[in-house]
Amino acid sequence: MKVRRAAIYARVSTDNQTTQNQIRELRLHARRMGWEIVQKYVDQGISGAKGREQRPAYDQMLKDAARKEFDVIAAWSVDRLGRSLQDLVVFLGEIHGKRIDLYLHQQGLDTTTPAGKALFQMCGVFAEFERAMIVERVNAGLARARAQGKQLGRPRIGAAMESKVRKLRAKQHGIMRIAKALGIGVGTVQRIVAFP
């Protein structure tokens, strides 16, 4: 039987806290399960409310997960991974897509077992339901705004501004330079020069 490669993720919110207890318990569990710990990721003094880009160890773990450098992620509890439901849903989707299992010590969630997999899938169903509800609320809000006659999307620029863009482009100015000079978006400049 192939030995499962495990990654440990630990995080504390302040510098005067320690991840030692989290790591010790996760190492013990890995030993009991026969997992080989191949990597340890620790974010020290970083809030779980911070996004991926502000949590270097978490970010690196997800990059390594994309390369399938381990088979299971072990963390102390779900709040170590994040406090935003939206971020957690994205995290679960990423690792599930790579067929990487998850073990959460405090919640007793272990997707390496049939019961854990079932619970994980139920979490996915609830997350999908939540996403559908958000989409429904956004669409209802857009429909209400349209019914009230509100203009949606970016405001259109006038013919005079389009003329300025074309003149600068005719003088061989680059798209980014034009956008900066006129204070408009790069995408707007690209649209104008693409359809003269």
Image (cartoon, rainbow, N blue to C red):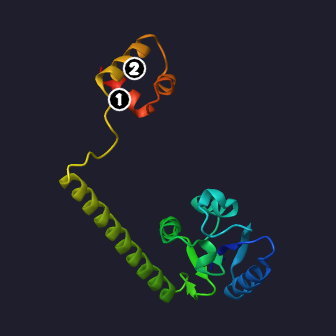
Residue 103 sits in quarter: bottom right
Q: Residue 191's mark?
A: 1
Q: Nearer the viewer, residue 23 or 196?
A: 196
Question: Circle 2 is placed at which residue position?
Answer: 165
Marks 2 and 1, how far apart at CA: 10 Å
| Front: mark 2 or 1 | 2
Q: Nearer the viewer, residue 147 or 111?
A: 147
Residue 112 sits in quarter: bottom right
Quadrant in which the N terminus appears = bottom right
Q: Is residue 72 visible?
A: no
Q: Is residue 42 above or below residue 122?
A: above
Residue 138 in the image: state x and y as whole percent: 31, 61
Tell me which label, 2 or 1, sits earlier in the chain.
Answer: 2
Q: Is residue 144 above or below residue 183?
A: below
In this picture, residue 40 sits left or right of residue 177: right
Q: Residue at 49%, 65% (x, y): give it.
A: 90
Q: What kind of element bears circle 1?
A: helix
Q: Residue at 48%, 65% (x, y): give it.
A: 97
Near mark 1 (Cα within 10 A), the count class, few <14, some 14-19 or many ≥20, is few
Q: Residue at 32%, 44% (x, y): give it.
A: 153
